[in-house]
Image: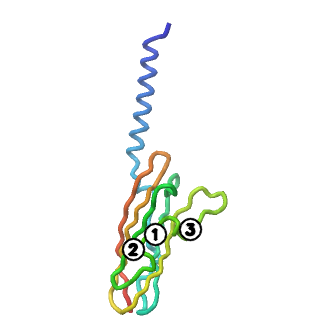
Amino acid sequence: MLNFRRITSLAAAVVALASAQVQAAEQVDPTTLYEVSTEGTSTKVKAGEEGVFVLSIKSKSGAHVSDEAPLKLELKGTQVSPAKEKLALADSVAKKAAGQQFVDPRFEVPFKAPAAGKGTLEAKLTFFICSEQLCARQQKTFSIPVEVL
């Protein structure tokens, strides 16, 4: 005959373990799993010449940018014109090496600066950062001043 107390305590232990795992997943702040940088973006460009907008996502240990969920990068310019305004993961210049499971995306988008003055590049990035505990949608916006000489 089954021991009712033993079954009850086993069930309670399973529920407690599941609850602890859910709480642990909820406690992970997804913004701590990556860094986004625009380092390398041209902030001074001569009139009539091209600059480049650079955006990279660097995932931290145990995390990765999802290559299955949509990634969108939207660019707009004031006094400058990006060569492409809507980008996806396929537009990343970083490609997987042989045997590599995930790659951190990096975008390099040329832009034209037709006339002297102060310009701005506006970027809106949407992507999913994932770990063993979660996969969370992230959205970041950037405004980068560009001086056209």
**Residue at point 53%, 66% (across, down):** 90
Q: Looking at the image, is mark 3 or mark 1 nearer the viewer?
A: 1
Where is residue 132? Give x, y as percent. 50, 46
* Outermost residue toward the right in this view: 98
Tell me what residue is drawn at x 41 percent, y 23 percent: 12
User: Which element type, helix, strand or loop, lies under badge 3?
Assistant: loop
Sort mark 3 into few (<14), some (14-19) or many (20+) by Cα contacts within 10 Å. Answer: some
Question: Quick check: marks 3 and 1 in contact, CB under 8 Å?
Answer: no
Query: How far across and down, in percent of the image, does residue 146 sit?
Result: 37, 83
Residue 10's spot in the image, x, y percent? Answer: 46, 21
- Vertical order, 2 against 31 (above or below): above
Labels 2 and 3: the sequence-earlier one: 2
C-alpha gap between disc 3 and disc 1: 14 Å
Query: Could you classify mark 1 by the number of other residues whose Cα lies within 10 Å: few (under 14), some (14-19), or many (20 or more)?
Result: some
Q: Name which quarter of the figure residue 77 lies in.
A: bottom left
- Residue under numbered circle 1: 87
Q: Is residue 57 left or right of residue 121?
A: right
Residue named by callout 2: 75
Residue beneath disc 3: 94
Looking at the figure, which quarter contains the C terminus?
A: bottom left
Q: Secondary structure at mark 2?
A: strand
- 2 vs 3, front mark: 2
User: In the rendering, which numbered label is found on residue 73?
Assistant: none
User: Sequence order check: which comes first, mark 3 or mark 1?
Assistant: 1
Label 1 close to label 2 by CB (< 8 Å):
yes
Quarter-wise, where is residue 147 in the image?
bottom left
Answer above or below: position of 68 versus 89: above
- Disc 1 residue type (three-letter): Leu
- What's the amino acid at mark 3? Ala
For badge 2, the amino acid type reads Leu
